[in-house]
Image (spheres, rainbow, N blue to C red):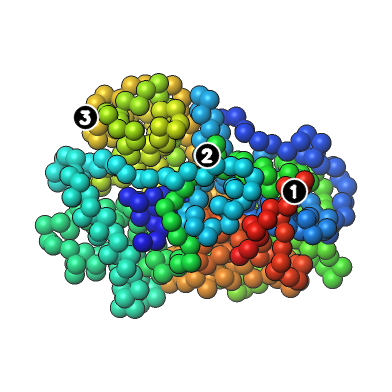
Amino acid sequence: MDRRSLLRGGLVLGASAGAGGLVFACSAEDSQPVPGDSVDTDVIVIGAGMAGLTAANALSTAGRAVTVLEARDRIGGRTYTVEAAGVPVDMGASWIHTPRGNPLTCLANQVGVQVRRDPDEPIAVYEALQRQALLSASQVADLDTAFSAFDEAAESLNRELGPAASIADGILRFTRDEIRARDRAVVTAYLDLTVGSLDYALVPAALGLASQLSYDERLGGVDAIPVGGYGQLVAALAQPLQVRLGEVVSAVEVADSGVRVRTTSGSWRASSVIVTVPLGVLQSEDIVFDPPLPEEKRAAMARLRMGNLEKVILRYETAWWRANQDRLNLFEISQEQSYPAFVDLGPEVAPTLMGIYGGDFAAQNVSRGDDATVVAGVNAVLRRITQTEPPAPIAVLRSDWTNDPYSRGSYANLIPGATAADMAEMGEPIGERVLFAGEATVPVNYQTVHGAYLSGLREAGRILGREDLVLSTGTAPLVGCAAG
């Protein structure tokens, strides 16, 4: 089974510009730009997310002078660890997907961050379409089996329906041929929700069926989480680096002699630049390229789209939803798809639910209402699933990647007609001076943190002209963590 099954830990990459205190930050000295000056360096890296920090770390460890320019007032990009009433939670990326063979597992081990298996069972599933009741364990297993069967049928469905088919087309054909008539409505709604809104964070009609074909089968294992948050891994990679915060890039200009990057504070010169901003920022054209991006890259970019996946973190005094269990995840199948999934952060963490929602509901809902309005909507779902009146949470945190100008969505997707080759094109350099990294540039690992990490290694290796890269915390090498 691949990394995507909801009932087996496949909630993918979330994201946030949410509230809460930063768990890490660069030093004040490192974060202050030099207004109006042109600063000479070997390589400029635009973006201090996982891709940018990994590339910069590998280059710096190899002896290259690197300057990282970050628009936000923090490092980490779409990894963002905050505190909810004293509990560290990831408002952005939460999981190390397929941790066996994953370089992030190596990184966590090297920097002393515990990685904990994140079981998605037991789970309470409420079906709000026909039964208006909790499903039995066997009924939940049947849905999980349907999910697996759809995933396994994706290749044959893609051949049959053609390259322009959407995931909605694939689900329609699959349920017509494989699912009994009396179960079709529930299975269809379940696949729409899990494959569409929660996996890819878009409605199935907006997603290319080819999305189901792009996985890295070399990795495996049950999804895990870095205990204490992804911020620790980000901080370790950033330790030896010069990161300039608050530097909003407006232009990348290329000449025979090098590149000039224009920002809110002035301009920066280098031999080459690695652009690691999210796909949504590139599509916004907030960064002007001179000369313009080539037609091949712009065409590939037009066949990709950012998904919308958001979180609401609910910290409670007691784990009121668990009854006598140590952990209980919650899920609702409905047409509205409002707040459908709640991940119990488990007995190792103070009582906390991580609500996850995506697709059109996330795109339309994240900027509306205050915390009280959101909690009221969440409680309506929780009340149905638990048959209990939810108590008031002691802390509420919400993400809003959709409206964040430095992400403009959660992660990249293929629209109908697109292929993994479009992701590969996004990773192609322009000449020798302008390079690109980030999860949207990795065909078999897109939407993941390890995909971003691997893309950073790829571009550092391209500049250095070798693959035997080394990462460092600034005081010690990270042994074995630079393998792609």
The reply to whether discs 3 and 2 touch (Cβ–Cβ < 8 Å) is no
Q: Which residue is mark 2?
A: 227
Q: Position of residue 432 (x, y in %)?
A: 76, 71
Q: Which residue is mark 3?
A: 387
Identify the element where label 3 is drawn. loop
423 left or right of 156 in image:
right
Going by the numbered disc 3, the residue's amino acid type is Gln
In this orientation, does residue 435 appear? no
Q: Residues within 10 Å of mark 3 (few under 14, many from 20)?
A: few
Residue lying at 58% horizontally and 42% vertically, measured from the top left: 113
Q: Nearer the viewer, residue 96 or 439?
A: 96
Q: Earlier in the sequence, mark 1 or mark 2?
A: 2
Going by the numbered disc 1, the residue's amino acid type is Ala
Separation of residues labelled 3 and 2 (CA atoms) = 31 Å
Residue lying at 52% horizontally and 39% vertically, measured from the top left: 227
Q: Earlier in the sequence, mark 3 or mark 1?
A: 3
Q: Position of residue 246 (x, y in %)?
A: 72, 41
Identify the element where label 2 is drawn. loop
253 left or right of 301 in image:
right
Separation of residues labelled 1 and 2 (CA atoms) = 22 Å
The disc placed on residue 476 is 1
Separation of residues labelled 3 and 1 (CA atoms) = 53 Å
Q: Nearer the viewer, residue 280 or 132?
A: 132
Seen in the picture, residue 24 relative to 156 is either above or below; the reply is above
Residue lying at 23% horizontally and 52% vertically, measured from the top left: 141
Q: Earlier in the sequence, mark 3 or mark 2?
A: 2
Of marks 3 and 2, the one in the foreground:
2
In this orientation, does residue 192 appear? yes
Q: Position of residue 316 (x, y in %)?
A: 40, 24
Seen in the picture, residue 456 relative to 379 is either above or below; the reply is below
Residue lying at 51% horizontally and 29% vertically, measured from the top left: 87
Identify the element where label 1 is drawn. loop
